[in-house]
Amino acid sequence: MPRRGLILQTRTHWLLLGLALLCSLILFLYLLECAPQTDGNASLPGIVGENYGKEYYQALLQEQEEHYQTRATSLKRQIAQLKQELQEMSEKMRSLQERKNVGANGIGYQGNKEQAPSDLLEFLHSQIDKAEVSIGAKLPSEYGVIPFESFTLMKVFQLEMGLTRHPEEKPVRKDKRDELVEVIEAGLEVINNPDEDDEQEDEDGPLGEKLVFNENDFIEGYYRTERDKGTLYELFFKKADLMEYKHVTLFRPFGPLMKVKSEMIDITRSIINIIVPLAERTEAFAQFMQNFRDVCIHQDKRIHLTVVYFGKEGLSKVKSILESVTSESNFHNYTLVSLNEEFNRGRGLNVGARAWDKGEVLMFFCDVDIYFSAEFLNSCRLNAEPGKKVFYPVVFSLYNPAIVYANLDVPPPVEQQLVHKKDSGFWRDFGFGMTCQYRSDFLTIGGFDMEVKGWGGEDVHLYRKYLHGDLIVIRTPVPGLFHLWHEKRCADELTPEQYRMCIQSKAMNEASHSHLGMLVFREEIEAHLHKQAYRTNSEAVG
């Protein structure tokens, strides 16, 4: 390629030189035409021969002037044509050179940046700059958010379910599967063959060999597409015997993938302060603490629990539950804050966040009817970054087990109900209460709006604050976060808007569309079954 480029440059140089000589020749001929013509044998008028009058000389001068003007106009037109042809030829040669460079070099996530045309690289990088990759975009409302969708090697957890209405897709649709396989392979290529500018250190295996990652080390990924810019991919890899995660960010600017960054994330010392506002509901709190004991105390072991309790009734029961957990598991990393006032979720979370006095900490705002896994806690750590990102996972909300498992005498245990099926629950994409964010970001943005009273609304206000700022909001369904069904009561004291939201949430929480249909048409179904049984008996008797 360098030799071809040199030949093209040489040809262009000679072409310009030839055109310059041609222009010089035309100018020389023009000067000859304009010079006075002399004839040695001709006699000058007025000296020899007949006498000419003044009119004759004026006519002669006018004739010669018109001749020279016509000649000059012709030359100017020829020069303009030559300039235009030169410009067109130069553009064609430049276009040809660019096409040859693109065809010979190509662009990929491991391509040679020096060989690629500079203008193409500038365009691709401008797509990254315009997309929401390195800094959050200021959005007018929650309706402008482009949510992520999460995936593993075998499944995709999706908000836009299409005609199938499957919140969890397995096997993945072919075009989506091929895309995600390519992305995982590209991420492995980045990790196993890092560039010099990657923020990671070479690691060795147990026997001193080079540590090589494969697809079995892929833990989870998130992706979202901005239709006018490209697709962003966040990939996380981890070896079973290592504590650190490998994080790779890729971006497809409607073309080949481009590596954004590759970094090591150490979450071994990342403490999560789980903050739970509570009023009464002691039985639900006992069930919550059972999950907390199994996941946080026995598995994760990097958790602090803050319970903000409203009122006096049930407070002694909550203290007893916490003391029981302390004595059984030797767990002392908890704080109980008592407020003798009416329940207000935003107020409780504000108080819980400020009760922490040990500096920066990652907070998980949680409710008592939430079930989470140890994997979710790691997702919380991986997707929140102080001054950079906040994590708003989409919870999978379970339907009423009495309806879902109506064909059974008794609903199965809670652990067996935690499945992602369209008749067992739904992605609560309208809920913003469960969130992971750093304490400094929460305090900087001003916390919850204390003007919001009663049920709902305060979560959306906080969510909108982040959307209006510069932090990146990670919004994605996660497989390890469930909202357990419980009966809702919409109080008369709520505002019309809050009451509408409460009733809507209550209706959506009860059962799937098909199960609700079975309840609505129960009498019609029973009448049909009765007729079928009667007809069958009549035919048997006949």
Image (spheres, helix red, strand yellow):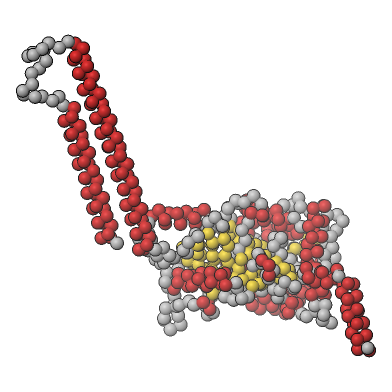
Q: Position of residue 304 (x, y in %)?
A: 66, 68
Q: Position of residue 242 (x, y in %)?
A: 52, 77
Left or right side of 87 for 221: right
Quarter of the image holding residue 390? bottom right
Q: Position of residue 293 (x, y in %)?
A: 70, 76
Residue 445, compared with residue 419, is above or below; it is above
Residue 117, compared with residue 518, is above or below; it is above
221 vs 159, nearest the viewer = 159
Q: Is residue 119 visible?
A: yes
The mark tally for this picture is 0
Left or right side of 542 for 345: left
Left or right side of 320 for 434: left
Residue farthest along the bottom direction in this orientation: 541
507 vs 47, nearest the viewer = 47
532 vs 503, nearest the viewer = 532
Quarter of the image holding residue 302? bottom right
Q: Position of residue 202 (x, y in %)?
A: 42, 73
> Residue visible at 27% across and 59% down?
4
Residue farthest along the front direction in this orientation: 50
Quarter of the image holding residue 177? bottom right
> Residue visible at 13% across and 25% down?
37
> Residue visible at 29% across and 62% down?
1
Q: Is residue 375 visible?
A: no
In what quadrant of the picture does the C terminus appear? Answer: bottom right
> Residue visible at 91% across and 86% down?
539
